[in-house]
Structure formats: C-alpha cells, structure tokens
Amino acid sequence: MQETLYTMATLVPAAVLGGLAGAYCALVADAYVAALMAGGEPDSPCLRRALGRALQPTPQKVVATFQIMSACTVLMASCFAILGLVHGYTLFSLALAVASATLLILALIDAHTRLLPDALTLPLMWAGLALAWGGFGISLGDAVAGAMAGYGFLWSLFWVFKCLSGREGMGYGDFKLLAALGAWLGWRALAMVLLASCVAAVLFAMLRQRSLAPDGAYPFGPFLAASGTAGLLLGSYLIMPI
C-alpha cells in the first residue's frame, strides 16, 4: 500500500510537468509555423525565435488551437508519467522526455507544413549518438548502425519509387527523422518503427477518407514520431533493450 502511494505521489508531479511541456510544445510549433508562413526560413535562428516567442500572446493560433493544446497536454502528461514508471527518475529519463517533446514538435510542424526542419531532426540524431557514446541506452555501435540504416533505407526507397513512378514519395526530412530514431532506438527497432508508422498512416487515411482504398498523400513524419515515441517510452517492453 505504501509503495503504491509512493508511486502515485511521484507520478503526479511528472504528469503535471509533462502537461506543461505538451502545452509549450504546441506553442513552439505554432510560433515556428507562423514564422514560416510569414516568409521565414526553416533554420536554427527561426527555431530559436520560436522558442522565445512561444509564450507571447498572438492574435490567432495556427497550430495551438484549444483542441490541439488539450491533446498535447494529455499526451505529454501520459508520456512523462510512463517514463517515470518504466525508467525511473534519472538523467536518461530526462533525455527521453526531451526527445519525446522534440518528436511532438516535429509531428505538429510536419502536419501543418509538410516540413521536418533540420534544426530539430539533426540535433535529435546527434543527441541519441552522444548518449550512446556516453554509455546511456543502447551501445554506440547500435546507435550508429541505426542512424545509417534509418537514413539509408528511406533514401533507397525514395529513389526506387522515383525511378519507377517519376514522383517523389517522401521528403528528405523523413530520412533524417528515421535516422534520428535509429540513433536512439538502434537498428533492430527500425523494422517495428516503420511497420507501426505505415499501419498507422494507412488506418488514418482510411478513416479520413472513409474508404478502404484511400488515395492522396499525407505527411509521414507524425506517424514516424508517434511510433518512435512509443519506442522511447516503453523500451525493452516493446522493441529495444534499454
């Protein structure tokens, strides 16, 4: 009984912090998308300005509507609570929390702009490699192999599809995002990440169009981010040994 009460007492602050982080992620994505719509470049200075302007009042929200803010708050509250429950309260858990928040921002930006900015995907990849080098999570060899396999697989798929159809099936940001996920999760997890992403994307398209044979194109980044977040949160309970 006491152990249960202690667990609940530690999860509540984590969930509250996660909820605040989720709301902030929505505001950052909103400021970044607004800057792009105003003619800004998708680079690091634009992201830094978005981080600073996220809490400033704006006349109209592009991304951070009430529904999206609420969803992000609940989502990140759940993520932080799961991290505390599965991984405990360590520096590595903090790194996983930051990575999850970054994936949420990327998903929101891609959903509204079909863009996965290098200013977020590349630091996410290097952070995963740095943590592996420091002895956290997977081995450095697995992290490097994951980054290479993630980028290389989607890059190859991109060119095969383009040669056969003459069209581009995805953007380079998707390559870099999967490379970043590979750096965090390792190469063994990539098959499950891709499978979950593809299944989620197909189900979303079917529900969105109310058809068993949907057509058209949707951003793939949000689905990669969602499946990657599941891998970060659940670790050895799902697809990777952490």
Image (cartoon, grey):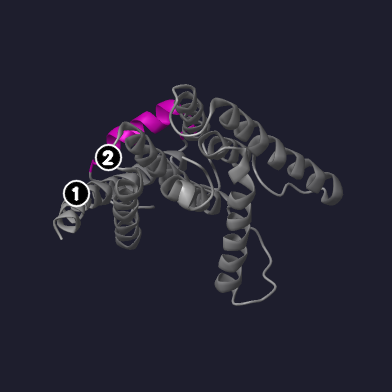
Residue at the image position 52 percent from the left and 52 percent from the top: 227
What amino acid is at disc 2?
Answer: Tyr
What amino acid is at disc 1?
Answer: Thr
Q: Nearer the viewer, residue 211 or 16?
A: 16
Q: Residue 89, labelled with which disc? A: 2
- The residue range painted magenta reads 40-56
Residue at the image position 46 percent from the left and 52 percent from the top: 237
Whole-percent x, y for residue 169 in the image: 71, 49
Crowding near the residue tagged with mark 1, few <14, some 14–19, many ≥20 C-alpha atoms within 10 Å: some
- In the image, is residue 55 part of the stretch drawn in magenta? yes
Crowding near the residue tagged with mark 2, few <14, some 14–19, many ≥20 C-alpha atoms within 10 Å: few
Total labels drawn = 2
Which element is circle 1 on? helix
Whole-percent x, y for residue 107 in the image: 47, 49
Q: Nearer the viewer, residue 135 or 124?
A: 135
Question: Residue 72, located in which quarter of the rendered image?
Answer: bottom left
Whole-percent x, y for residue 220 in the image: 59, 52
User: Position of 131 compared to 220: left or right?
Assistant: left
Residue at the image position 29 percent from the left and 40 percent from the top: 54
Q: Nearer the viewer, residue 89 or 183?
A: 89
Q: Nearer the viewer, residue 221 or 54?
A: 221
Q: Residue 10, labelled with which disc? A: 1
For the question of whether residue 78 can be seen, the reply is yes
Which element is circle 2 on? loop
